[in-house]
Amino acid sequence: MDGFHPLTLIVTFMSVKIRLARRGRKKQAIYDVVVADARAPRDGRFIEKLGTYNPNTNPASINLNNERALTWLLNGAQPTDTVKAMLSYRGVMLKKHLQIGVLKGAISQDQADAKFNAWLAEKDSKIEGKKDRLAAAKEKQRKDALAAEAAKNQARIDALKAKEAEASAAAIAVEEETASAEVSEVETTTAQATEVETTSAEAPEAEVAAEEAPVAEVEAEEAPAEVAAEEEAPVAEAAAEETPSAEAEEGAADAE
């Protein structure tokens, strides 16, 4: 057993996989990174749990026990493609490569650790930069959404103001029409009242004229009596003229 890790015997007798075991709700799946027998069901029994993987965040959340994962890799456990990408993302695959170099004597442990720490710092800076960019993009999206909502609200307010202005103009027009109609009605009523007053003023004069008409008729009827009197006047005069002849006859009689 010289030169072999104690877990090598386990790997020799069975195929060990580092894979994902699904859990969580529908469309909100969360995975466990587990070491399991390749013959076991996907969500069945496992040998050890190494961490968790949550793809629902941006960037994805990967929590791993790097040391235990490195140990299993060095003892021959085979990661699936997804888990291998995750291990590369966390630097476990690079650390395995450096550790193999240390075991072969190509580099010292201090050099391997320095290289890994440098890579890890660069990786962390990239991750933080991505988080900052995502946060800035999210903030910009939020501000754009607020600006769009404000513009939409302003447009709605302008539309309401325009409608109110139109309604006010229509109300003013109706009031003007009503006032004009009332003025016309008042003028018509005034004209009718004036006409009635004129008619009422002319009616007594007509009545007076009607009352004076019989008087004229009476005068017209009395006029022939005067004419008759005038006609009788010559007869009286003639009688007066005849009266001396009687006296003359009386004188003649006396003379005899």
Image (tube, rainbow, N blue to C red):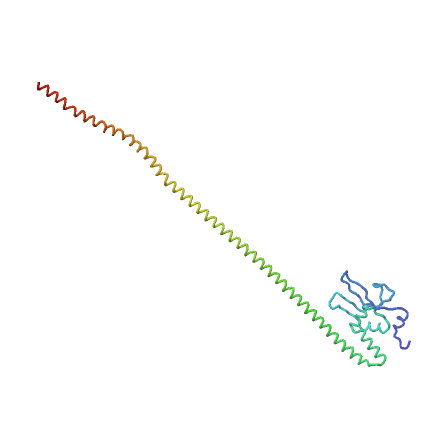
Q: Is residue 103 left or right of residue 121?
A: right
Of 9 and 243, which appears nearest the observer? 243
Residue 65 picture location, percent across and down: 80, 71
| Residue 54, quarter of the rendered image | bottom right
Q: Quadrant of the C terminus?
A: top left
**Residue 41 x %, y %:** 85, 63
Give the side of residue 32 with respect to residue 222, left or right: right
Residue 81, given in percent of the width and then of the height, sits at: 82, 69
Position of the N terminus, as image quadrant, is bottom right
In the rendered view, tell whether residue 110 sits above or below residue 42.
below
- Asked where in the image residue 217 lies, by quadrant, the reply is top left
Q: Residue 57 in the image: x percent, y percent?
A: 74, 66
Asked if 184 appears above or below 249 in the picture, the reply is: below
Residue farthest toward the left in the current orientation of the protein: 255
> In this figure, what is the number of numbered marks?
0
Which quadrant holds residue 104? bottom right
Name the residue at the top extreme.
256
Q: Is residue 250 left or right of residue 200?
A: left
Question: Foreground residue, 180 or 138?
Answer: 180
